[in-house]
Image (cartoon, rainbow, N blue to C red):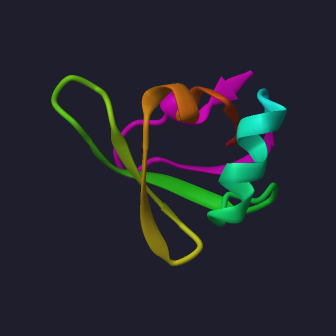
């Protein structure tokens, strides 16, 4: 199972689900819905946080949050 944090810069994937139900609600409110295509836009030098492109905008996530998003592709 791959997570969003496994993607490299400019690599795309499709959100398939979440591993943390509590955090899933927050992420879905920000546009991270299952079936939505995402890509990693930027990664901080130490790997945390990372900026992703989702739903037409860039969203900054902590690595812990990115680890809870499972992806396909």
For image coordinates 31% across by 30% down, the residue present is 48
Residue 60 drawn at (x, y percent): 40, 51
Q: Residue furthest left?
A: 45
Q: Is residue 10 magenta?
A: yes
Task: Please count the marks in the image.
Answer: 0
Which image quadrant: the N terminus?
A: top right
Q: Is residue 49 magenta?
A: no
For image coordinates 49% across by 54% down, the residue present is 39
Residue 50 drawn at (x, y percent): 35, 42
- Residue 3 located left or right of residue 57: right
- Residue 46 located left or right of residue 11: left
Q: Is residue 3 above or below residue 11?
A: above
Q: Is residue 15 above or below residue 21?
A: below
For image coordinates 45% across by 29% down, the residue present is 63
**Of 49 and 56, which appears nearest the observer?**
49
Chain part drawn in magenta: 1-17
- Residue 27 located left or right of residue 53: right
Residue 5 drawn at (x, y percent): 50, 30
Q: Is residue 53 above or below residue 45?
A: below
For image coordinates 70% across by 63% down, the residue present is 29
In which quarter of the view is residue 44 placed? top left
Which image quadrant: the C terminus?
A: top right
């Amino acid at each position: 199972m791959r997570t969003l944090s496994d993607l490299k810069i400019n690599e795309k994937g499709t959100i398939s689900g979440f591993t943390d139900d509590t955090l899933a609600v927050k992420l879905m409110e920000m546009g991270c819905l299952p079936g939505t295509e995402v890509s990693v836009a930027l990664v901080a030098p130490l790997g945390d946080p990372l900026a992703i492109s989702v739903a037409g905008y860039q969203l900054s996530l902590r690595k812990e949050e990115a680890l809870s998003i499972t992806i396909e592709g």
